[in-house]
Amino acid sequence: MCIRDSLYADTASRTADANRSRNTSPAPGSGVIAEVIFTASGTQLLTPGVFGFSPSGGTTYYTKITNDGSTGNVSVDFTYVQLEA
């Protein structure tokens, strides 16, 4: 199992990042807010906390989940905390 979960600021960033390989880091300014790669089941605590924003000022964020390994169910939970109104 190898799961890659990427969180993006907008849909254009997600589309532009579609063909990046798992072994290549995202470029600065690419719109990737956070990325976690799992090789086994578990939980990943991102510390220090990850700060991101939507360039449109909205509260919608986009994710891409890629399973490069065996088939099976994948469950992903995000916690979103708005810091300013």
Image (cartoon, helix red, strand yellow):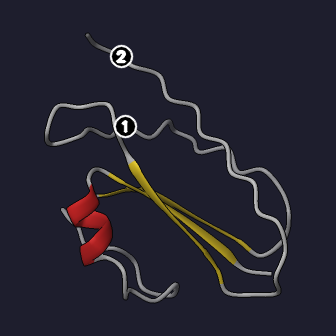
Looking at the rendered structure, the number of numbered marks drawn on it comes to 2
To which quarter of the image does residue 2 belong?
bottom right
Q: Which label number is shown at residue 51?
A: 1
Residue 83, position as x, y percentages in the image: 36, 16
Q: Is residue 79 left or right of residue 55?
A: right
Look at label 1 and name its amino acid.
Phe
Q: CA distance from mark 1 to mark 2?
A: 10 Å
> Dot 2 corresponds to which residue?
83
> How dense is the environment of label 1, judged by Cα within 10 Å: few (below 14), some, or many (20 and up)?
few
Q: Is residue 16 above or below residue 22?
A: above
Circle 1 SS class: loop
Q: Are marks 1 and 2 in contact (CB under 8 Å)?
A: yes
Residue 51: image location, x then y, percent: 37, 37
27 left or right of 49 in image: left
| Residue beneath the point at 47% across and 22% down | 81
Residue at the spot 17% in from the left edge and 31% down from the top edge = 57
Q: Name the foreground residue: 84 vs 10.
A: 10
Answer with the quarter of the image where residue 5 lies.
bottom right
Q: Is residue 73 left or right of residue 29?
A: right
Please give the name of the residue rendered at 15% of the width and 42% of the height, measured from the top-left corner.
Answer: 55
Work out whether mark 1 precedes mark 2 in sequence or the reverse, and give the earlier one: 1
Residue 72, image quadrant: bottom right
Does 61 appear above or below 23?
above
Callout 2: SS: loop
Q: Residue at x 14, y 39 (%)?
A: 56
* Residue 61 image point, x, y percent: 37, 45
